[in-house]
Amino acid sequence: MDKKTIKIVCFAGLQKYFGAETSVAVEPEATYSDVVTELVTANPEAEEVLNSCRIAVKEEFVSLSDKLESVDTLFLIPPSSGG
């Protein structure tokens, strides 16, 4: 099967590594963890921040083990000071 391109919106410190938006191509049955892995591969310097981010889709947080299925855009939210 062809890979699926996922648009990723980055916030705060992640923009240093990927800009405000980036994208990755993943297998159709990929999980959110696979997306993070692709981003770490693209920019290993961002690994620490990526591993502490939360992922939101359609205004809800998702688990790294969840499959992307009908997702086209996700939001990577790094931790911020104070919470």
Image (tube, grey):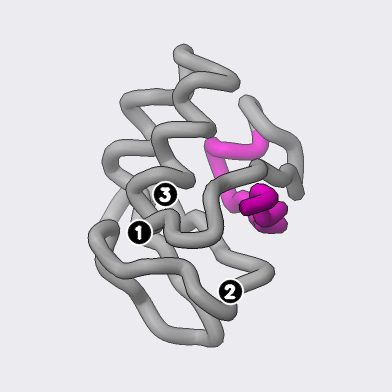
Residue at the spot x=47%, y=68% of the render?
A: 68
Residue at mark 2:
71
- Crowd tier of the residue under label 3, counting other residues whose Cα lies within 10 Å: few below 14, some 14–19, many 20 or above: some
Residue at mark 3:
78
What separation in Å lies between label 2 and label 3 (alpha carbons)? 20 Å
Identify the image quadrant of residue 48.
top left
The reply to whether residue 65 is visible in this rendering is yes
What separation in Å lies between label 2 and label 1 (alpha carbons)? 16 Å
Q: Name the amino acid, label 1.
A: Arg
**Mark 3 or mark 1: whose residue is earlier in sequence:** 1
Numbered range of the magenta stretch: 1-15
Q: Secondary structure at mark 3?
A: loop
Residue 54 numbered tag: 1
Q: Name the amino acid, label 2.
A: Val
Query: Quarter holding the C terminus?
Result: bottom left
**Does residue 73 show up magenta in the picture?**
no
